Image (cartoon, rainbow, N blue to C red):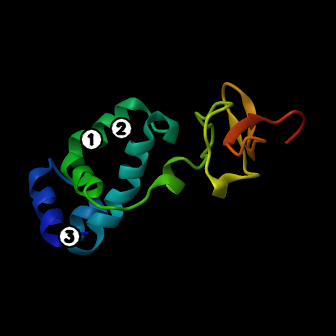
Amino acid sequence: MNESVWARAMTQDAGFISSYAADFPMTEDVAESFLPYVMWKRGVASGVGSEQLATMERTISHRFEAFESTAIDLRPLIDWPLGQSSHSPEEACWRSDIGAKMKTATYGWLTCAKRSDGRLLWVKVRSGR
């Protein structure tokens, strides 16, 4: 993270996401802001309510923009199942997900599988887990 970009974001935001970040802004603010950023990226699928997500965005939106400006690959954090997933059958998955299983609220258990045509897709698990 570029220090000047982060410092600018800190001054533009409404405050800090935690009292710990406020107490130690030079050493802990990035770390304290990262998990809320990941939750904000996942949206309600993160298990956080829409009101809480809106509060996070109001409080540290410029920090979120600073994270967005990096080239960090959040796919393992954003798309990996945490609780109930929003994936659906026939949706694409990654090679690293082959064999992974997840429970969805709508479709039950899904697994990532390589189809005969070579595509990687989430498919319904036929029986058990």
- For image coordinates 14% across by 50% down, the residue present is 13
| Residue 78 screen position, x and y as percent | 49, 49
- Confirm or deny contact between disc 1 and disc 2 (CB under 8 A): yes
Q: Secondary structure at mark 2?
A: helix
Q: Which quadrant of the figure contains the C terminus?
A: top right
Residue located farthest toward the front when viewing the structure as drawn: 117
Mark sitting on residue 2: 3
The foreground one among 120 and 83 is: 120
* Label of residue 86 in the image: none
Residue position marked by numbered label 2 in the rendering: 53
Which amino acid, mark 2? Answer: Leu
CA gap, disc 2 and disc 3: 25 Å
Q: Position of residue 111 (x, y in %)?
A: 75, 43
Q: Nearer the viewer, residue 78 or 98?
A: 98
Q: Secondary structure at mark 1?
A: helix
Graded by Cα atoms within 10 Å as few (under 14), some (14 to 19) or many (20 or more), the crowding at tag 1 reads some
Q: Give neighbour class at mark 3: few <14, some 14-19, many 20+ (Cα, 10 Å).
A: few
Q: Is residue 63 above or below residue 24?
A: above
Query: x%, y% of residue 30?
Result: 29, 65
First in residue order: circle 3 vs circle 1: 3
Looking at marks 2 and 3 on the same chain, the residue that comes earlier in the sequence is marked by 3
Residue topped by disc 1? 57
Disc 3, SS: loop
Note whether residue 101 is visible: yes
Name the residue: 25% across, 56% down: 69
At x 23% / y 67%, what residue is drawn?
23
Q: Quadrant of residue 93?
A: top right
In the picture, the quarter occupied by the N terminus is: bottom left
Horizontal side, residue 16 vs residue 12: left or right: right
- The residue positioned farthest toward the top in the image shown: 106
- Hey, what amino acid is under mark 1? Glu
- Residue at the limit of the structure toward the bottom, as seen here: 27
